[in-house]
Image: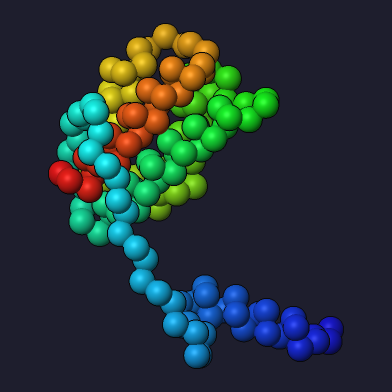
Amino acid sequence: MTLNIRQIAGLLLMAAAFFDLGVPGVVVPPKPPVVVPQPSISVTLPAIPDERKDAYAQFYTSLGQIVAEDGAKATPQLKDTTSFMTLHASALGFAIKTEHVGTVPGLGDAIDKAFFDRLGEEVKPLDSTTRGQIVEVCNAIAWRMLNG
């Protein structure tokens, strides 16, 4: 098998990214801090380890954005609260490192409680009000993670 120059360059870039070696001459700017405005509702969460606060908060602000943007589509993918909970669980499976799952006792239950307290436990369609409530809870979770 013969590799051309583009393939070799691509492999080197992938290796540099995978092994966090950096690319000579390329300066990666620091990640900006996650900023979440103080929410109109309050949630109670256990303490999150400092090294994970930003990533978890970014996850929940992004989840809220996805729900809001989906609602603006001509044909939304998320139809009801069950489809949202499925998205939430699936996205967590991709976003959270396996070794971190369950390391903050009570976190999963507290997050579920925040959603159920605001939305109720019954399955309901995702209209603009319900989507707004989901976004509100996502932002409240993110804010609480960052602000203890």
Residue under the image location 23 percent in, 26 percent down = 41
Q: Residue at x 28, y 23 (%)?
A: 113
Q: Is residue 33 left or right of residue 78?
A: left
Q: Name the quadrant containing residue 109.
A: top left
The residue lying toward the viewer, choosing from 142 and 90, is 142
x and y percentages locating residue 56 in the rendered image: 33, 48
Percent of width and height locating residue 124: 48, 11
User: What is the count of numbered marks?
Assistant: 0
Quadrant occupied by the C terminus: top left
144 w.r.t. 3: above or below = above
Q: Position of residue 21 (x, y in %)?
A: 46, 82
71 vs 102, nearest the viewer:
71
Q: Quadrant of residue 74?
A: top right
Position of residue 145 in the picture relative to residue 77 (left or right): left
- Residue 100 in view in this figure: no
> Looking at the picture, does residue 62 appear above or below residue 113?
below
Q: Quadrant of the N terminus?
A: bottom right
In this rendering, does residue 35 appear at all?
yes
Q: Nearer the viewer, residue 125 or 85?
A: 125
Q: Residue at x 58, y 30 (%)?
A: 72
- Left or right: 147, with 69 as reference point: left
Tell me if residue 43 comes above or below residue 18 in the rendering. Answer: above
